[in-house]
Amino acid sequence: MEIKYCNQCGGSVSLATPIGDSHPRHICVQCGYVHYQNPKVVTGCLVYQGDKVLLCKRAIEPRLGMWTVPAGFMENGESTRDAAKRETMEESGAIVAMQDLFLVANLPHANQVYMLYLAELKDTGPHGPETSEVTLFGKDDLPWEEVGFYTVKYGLMRFFEDLDKGKFSLHEIDF
Ligand SMILES: [Zn+2]
C-alpha cells in the first residue's frame, strides 16, 4: 500500500532502507518515523457435518454470488482460533466445535496469510449481511466452479481427500 503522509506527524515520507534493514520503508522526513508494513492474517473455518462442508454464498464483493468458507481478517487482540470462530459465527451463523488447524496458505503477492481450522457443525443460526445463503455440500454436489477463492478451493480439495483417507492433517502451501 502506498503511504503518502506520516501517520504520526503528517509530514511527507520517502522510501529508503534503514541501516541494517532488509526492505525499503516509508520513512517520515520530518520526525523519522518508520512505517512498517506486514502481511495480514485471514482466518476462518472449514465447517463440516459428516461428509458435507458448509459454504456461504457471498452477498458482497469481491466474488459476489460465489461460494466460500466463512473467513475474514483477524482483529487486534484476538487469537487466530478465536478470530476463525467469530468470523464463522458472523458470516454463517454456525455454532461450531473448533478442532485442529487444517490449512496454512501463504499469499506473498497479496501480503496475506490464510489459516483455516476444522470445525464440526453443532447448530445453525441467522447469518450476517455478507452472506446470502448457507448450505452444506458433499463432494459431488459442491459447485466447484463457483468457489470464489483458489485458497478455499485448495482447502476443500484437501478436506475431501483427507476424509476419504479417514485422517485429517495440516496442509501448508505457498501460492
Ligand atoms: Zn512524521
Image (cartoon, helix red, strand yellow):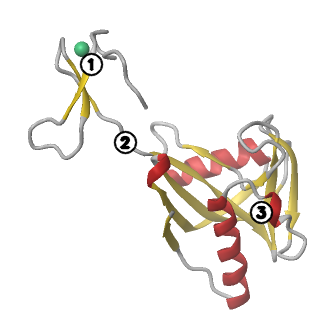
In front: mark 2 or mark 1? 1
Q: Name the residue under label 2.
A: 38
In front: mark 2 or mark 3? 2
Q: Is residue 30 above or below residue 126?
A: above
- Where in the figure is residue 101, as x and y percent of width and height? 54, 67
Indicate the secondary structure of the residue bearing disc 3: strand
Quarter of image, res 91: top right
Q: Is mark 3 within 8 Å of ligand 1?
A: no
The residue that appears at 64% across and 68% down in the rendered structure is 154
Indicate the secondary structure of the residue bearing disc 1: strand
The residue that appears at 73% across and 78% down in the rendered structure is 160
In front: mark 3 or mark 1? 1
Quarter, ligand 1: top left
| Residue type highlighted by circle 2 | Asn
| Residue type highlighted by circle 3 | Leu
Tag of residue 121: 3
Q: Name the residue under label 1.
A: 13
